[in-house]
Amino acid sequence: MRKIIINLLAITLSACAGVPQVLLIPGGQKVTQPGVSFVASENKSWSVLVQSTYQVTLRAKGDNPSETFVTSVSTYQIPKFSSPQDFLSFVKSGRAAEPESGRFEVVKNEEQLYAERAETCVRHEMESKDYGAKRGNDYTVIQYFGMNCIHPEISTIGIFVELSRKAPPGMEYPQFKALGSQLLKSVEFMAYR
């Protein structure tokens, strides 16, 4: 009997060891990675999907089980630009180069220089229909609010910051733009060393 209990205990413990632990970040907490930090939206509890040297991706559930939010911050290599307009053109062409698979249909897309920041940044606001993630409908609506910036310390490093929301059509969330703006305003750039 004792051997059976020990074996069952060993099996149970080894099964638990294989289950990854989900790291949770409470809303309103500052998240720091090399070169940049941001504050996760206050009214959500965030699960860490990815956290590496050059990328952080957080996910939160919405009020409805079919609604999700994602915050993404990543670092990428960019060429040097002679003007903010050149950076705007670079960001626009990069965003337009998405594969045309037929899965997504762009409903709205706005890209402009983000004058509210001292750094050179391009703010974007976009809405798409996602025909691959139906969630009980013909498609799902994805909203994006974010920016690409030239890091102020190293001009060949770009920083991407974005809040996105995925929900069934007709499920409005009027606070989305305010949440996105709050995220962008919370971003702070730091030296890499």
Image (cartoon, helix red, strand yellow):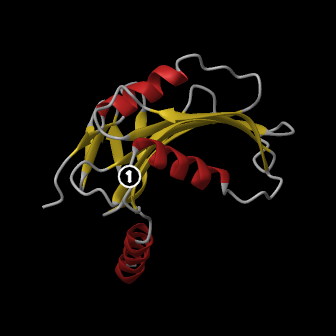
Residue at the bottom extreme of this rendering: 3
Residue at the top extreme of this rendering: 174
Q: List x then y, in percent, for residue 96.
A: 66, 51
Describe residue 88's horizontal placement relative to residue 143 as left or right: left
From what the image shows, is residue 175 above or below residue 106? above
Residue 161 quadrant: top left
Q: List x then y, in percent, for residue 167.
A: 68, 33
Q: Nearer the viewer, residue 136 or 192?
A: 192
Residue at the right extreme of this rendering: 138
Residue at the left extreme of this rendering: 193
From what the image shows, is residue 83 above or below residue 107? below
Residue at (37% x, 59% y) in the render? 80
Q: Nearer the viewer, residue 36 or 86?
A: 86
Task: Give the quadrant of the N terminus.
Answer: bottom left
Residue behind mark 1: 82
Residue at (33% x, 42% y) in the render? 25
Q: List x then y, in percent, for residue 85.
A: 47, 42
Q: Determine if residue 41 is in view.
A: no
Residue at (46% x, 29% y) in the render? 180
Give the number of marks: 1
What kind of residue is marked 1? Answer: Ser
Rate crowding at label 1 as few (under 14), some (14 to 19) or many (20 or more) other CA atoms within 10 Å. few
Task: Give the quadrant of the C terminus.
Answer: bottom left
Residue 4 quadrant: bottom left
Q: List x then y, in percent, for residue 67.
A: 63, 33
